[in-house]
Image (cartoon, rainbow, N blue to C red):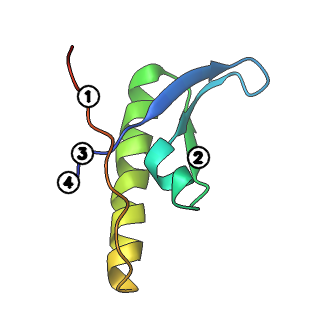
Amino acid sequence: MNHYSMLIAWSDADQAYVVSFPEWEAAGAIAHTHGDTYAEAVKAGEEMLAFLVDARQARGEPLPSPNMFVSA
C-alpha cells in the first residue's frame, strides 16, 4: 500500500472517531469513514484507502503524492 496519511479525530456530534485523508482531499476526493473505537477507525481507514487507490487505478488516474514526515 502507498504511504498515505489518515487523520483520526473524535467527533462529539457523531459519537465516533472520524477518519479523513489529507492527500486525497487535496486531490479533490472527499472521503471519510469512522469507527466506534480508535482501532475500528484505523481498520475502516485502511479499507477506505485501499478503495481510493483501487478506484483511481481502475480509472487510469494518477494517485496523489503521499505526505512524508521529515525529521528536523
Q: Residues within 10 Å of mark 4 (few under 14, many from 20)?
A: few
Does residue 18 appear to the left or right of 13 in the view shown?
Answer: left
Observer-side mark, 2 or 3, equals 3
Amino acid type of disc 4? Met
Observer-side mark, 2 or 1, equals 1
Residue at 32% over, 55% down: 65
Observer-side mark, 4 or 1, equals 1
Query: How far apart, in angstroms, are the residues tagged by discs 2 and 3?
Result: 17 Å
Residue 69 shows which numbered tag?
Answer: 1
Amino acid type of disc 1? Phe
Residue 3 shows which numbered tag?
Answer: 3
Q: Earlier in the sequence, mark 2 or mark 4?
A: 4
Residues at circles 4 and 3 in contact by the CB criterion of under 8 Å: yes
Query: How far apart, in angstroms, are the residues tagged by discs 3 and 1?
Result: 11 Å
Observer-side mark, 3 or 1, equals 1
Question: To which residue does mark 4 refer?
Answer: 1
SS at badge 1: loop
Image location of residue 32, percent across then percent down: 58, 46
Q: Quadrant of the C terminus?
A: top left
Q: Earlier in the sequence, mark 4 or mark 1?
A: 4
Residues at circles 2 and 3 in contact by the CB criterion of under 8 Å: no
Query: How far apart, in angstroms, are the residues tagged by discs 2 and 1?
Result: 22 Å
Residues at circles 3 and 1 in contact by the CB criterion of under 8 Å: no
Does residue 17 appear to the left or right of 60 in the view shown?
Answer: right
Q: Earlier in the sequence, mark 3 or mark 1?
A: 3
Residue at 74% over, 17% down: 12
SS at badge 3: loop
Q: Residues within 10 Å of mark 1 (few under 14, many from 20)?
A: few
Residue at 54% over, 52% down: 26
**Residue 19 vertical placement versus 39 (above, below):** below
Observer-side mark, 4 or 3, equals 3
Question: To which residue does mark 2 refer?
Answer: 32
